[in-house]
Image: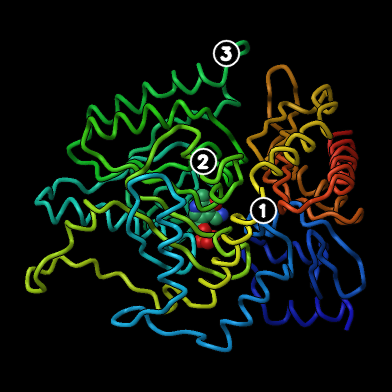
Amino acid sequence: MNNAALMQRDLQVLWHPCTQMKDHETLPLIPIRRGKGVWLEDFDGNRYIDAISSWWVNLFGHANPRINARITAQLERLEHVLLAGFSHEPAIELAERLVRITPPGLERCFFADNGSSAVEVALKMSFHYWRNLGQKRKTRFVTLGNSYHGETLGALAVGDVALYKQTYEPLLLQPLTVPSPDCFEREPGVSWEEHSRRMFDAMEEALARHADEVCAVIVEPLVQCAGNMRMYHPVYLRLLREACDRYGVHLIADEIAVGFGRTGTLFACEQAGISPDLLCLSKGLTGGYLPLSVVLTKERIYQAFYDDYERLTAFLHSHSYTGNPIGCAAALATLEIFDSEPVIERNRETAKRMGEAVEHLREHPHVGEIRQTGMILAIEMVREKDSKTPYPWQERRGLRVYRHALSQGALLRPLGNVIYFMPPYVIEPAEIQALARIAEEGIQLATRD
Ligand code: PMP
């Protein structure tokens, strides 16, 4: 088997996510034979650095021996059992550990099986909590401009990236959307902190006017990943926590993309010193191995559902593969790596190295900004540097970078005009240097006309 033969078979029967399939008339589809560490290898023997951790899921490399061993051992014991009326050790142990390592006050774990489902769980749980308390006017959610929380209908409704949302608008809940604290938009000379603080005024105003009909505010702490890796200052989360308390509204933190060390701390909320009422986790939870997600919440919320059956206050949300034991085993192995190795400290060095490797690109006439939060580094290409005028999306300049990177042995998958590095934590210095070189060449190629 080679790439061409597999691509041909694939295109007969598969329909790929996030893809205009017609693109594959000219764009090669890359079948991967195996992965090891940060490397992926295709059926023609080409190797690629997985610079985006396969959609931000992989933490400790492909085919990680510790995670492999734990999964294999679990397979011998129990592959799956329903989690209603039944339980299993991996789910219990994982829940105990998650309660221990997440911000204080999060004491209950509700498992699901992917990120979007976790967001659905959090939205329904918040709404249902207020209903159980007799507050039936609370039916709406507040979200940030440019946010992304997944693509099932509820999760899509509380996101704000037009590319994914616009078509389905007639099907969706109507959230209150407040401008994002995204610091790319700040005036020259204004600090991240000052900009994010100023942007909070709009949130304060929305809550002041609508708190009685709002269940929760949902945010991606510190980095709006699918919204082109836009970043903001932790002060916004601090102000938001305080306002949610004041107005009697839940705070849902969607750390699906940023949790487990991505932003420089184990959880992004730590940088603001806050605990949300509901915390959504997925992606890195299993080290990038298997679909699993969890919503952590407070005892007070759990207790609002706890009553005699006949009162019908129970939270009835279920997915067949909720808390799958093999997924939980992968998650436990991942947490053991965090326990036994100085991951966060090492990431600090790696993040610094990533920043230094692209520092000189700040001067490039078509680089509007280089921004970084921990292990997420983004380079925004612009048509006009001073005004930060974007290239029209129709020009698909990011795609040129994608193609160039593939030819040079890297999987960089720009979001629009934004090239980013979000690699597995095990990336080596030489691999970072290679990525920086490939990104620079890609930017030259993509911006020369
Ligand atoms: N929330 C955020 C912040 C995400 O980045 C994503 C996935 N990109 C999701 C939710 C949805 O997760 P999933 O793709 O597993 O449904």
Q: Amino acid at mark 1?
A: Glu
- Residue drawn at x 31%, y 79% as measured from the top left: 84
Q: Earlier in the sequence, mark 1 or mark 3?
A: 3
Residue 384 percent coordinates (x, y): 75, 23
From the image, state whether disc 1 or disc 3 is nearer to you: 1
**Closer to the camera, 329 or 278?**
329
For the view shown, which residue lies furthest in the bottom direction? Answer: 76
Residue underneath mark 1? 341
In the image, residue 296 above or below residue 435:
below
Seen in the picture, residue 159 relative to 168 is either above or below; the reply is: above
Say the numbered circle drawn on residue 190: 3
Q: Out of 319 and 105, give the one closest to the viewer.
A: 105
- Which class describes the residues within 10 Å of circle 1: few (<14), some (14-19), or many (20+)? few
From the image, state whether disc 2 or disc 1 is nearer to you. Answer: 1
Disc 2 residue type (three-letter) = Ala
Q: Does residue 72 sit above or below 337 in this rendering?
A: below
Label 2 Cα crowd, 10 Å radius (few <14 / some 14-19 / many 20+): many
The answer to whether residue 201 is above or below residue 4 is above
Q: What is the CA distance from the residue labelled 2 to the residue labelled 1?
A: 20 Å
Q: Amino acid at mark 3?
A: Val
Front one among 270 and 41: 270
Residue shown at 67% from the left, 61% from the top: 20
